[in-house]
Amino acid sequence: MLVVSDEVQAAVAGGRPVVALESTIIAHGLPRPRNLRVARELEELVREEGAVPATIAVLDGCPHVGLDKTQLERVANEEGIRKLGHRDLALAVAAGASGATTVSATALLAARAGVRVFATGGLGGVHREWTATQDESADLRLLARTRVTVVCAGVKSILDVAATLQRLETLGVAVAGYGTDRFPGFYLTDSGHPVDWTLRTPEEVAAVMRAQDSLGGPESALLVANPVPESEQLDPALHARVLAEALEACAERGITGQAVTPFLLDQLVRRTDGASLSANLAAVRGNVRLAGRIAAARAAR
């Protein structure tokens, strides 16, 4: 049922570095035709680091790990491409549907294909006012039971970052800052919260991955929190002002539940004149490069 491209399959079998990439940013995160240009750019960044890119999506009910040129164009351009979390995969397969994979679905399919390193932008997490809404991303529980190394820029800053870090601790998901003792805030270099562990080189990350395997503990993920450079982050004062106003607008309009996140993200893009999108892409590019180096360091051992 799982189709792994010949290139990815050969690299995994040969112990060569591979980096998984999600497809939601292609289908739902960027406007056309920029989305396809970015998709190709991210794959090229992986190759520049000596690794094989494995963009993941579901096409006509078939999960694919590694897309060819035509398949990548289809994800970027086809109308009706769904957004699939890991809970949706069986439904999409049975229905013959096509969809772009979120963090949880990408991590699951990557692990099934033997791909250990995964690069993304920011994770989902615990939403604000969780005590009232019980709204928490499916990413967290999936990562608690999936052995994959996720290079990310923290969690989206519109979330409850402190509660998300506490939830990751409760679930037993390892978190380390890359070159920092602060947890990044997706658009922001520093979310305002510390991390307990700092890793400074791809080789150190690879050593943690080997230690995970040697210890034989729960099949949980390693999160490598890689901050966007300060020079490319969204201006913190602008971020704080726009987010506060957007949250106020949510309350005034009665926007609740799953509608909150897309509304807040849309407001950030619109009311920062696209600066939030630029920071997002800067974070993704940095994460993809680092993931390639980590995969290469692991393969070298």
Image: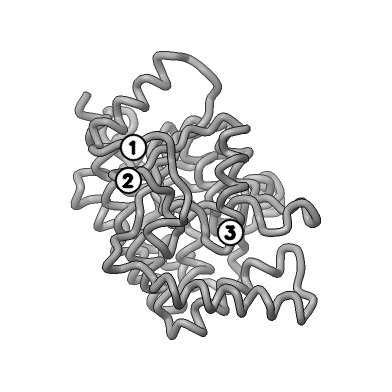
Cα separation between marks 3 and 1: 35 Å
SS category of the residue bearing label 2: loop
Q: Which mark is residue 198?
A: 1
Labels 1 and 2 touching (C-beta < 8 A): yes
Camera-near label (3 vs 1) is: 1
Q: Quadrant of residue 235?
A: bottom left
From this view, report whether residue 156 is shown above or below residue 12.
below
Give the residue at x 46% y 55%. 192
Q: CA distance from mark 2 to mark 3?
A: 35 Å
Q: Residue at x 68, y 44 (%)?
A: 90
Label whose residue precedes the other's in the sequence (1 or 2): 2
Image coordinates of residue 1 in percent, x first then y, are 57, 39
Residue at 44% over, 79% down = 32
Q: Residues within 10 Å of mark 1 (few under 14, many from 20)?
A: some
Q: Which mark is residue 99?
A: 3
Relative vertical location of residue 147 with respect to residue 93 in this rendering, above or below: above
Number of residues whose C-alpha sits closer than 10 Å to that of mark 2, classed few (under 14), some (14–19) or many (20 or more): some
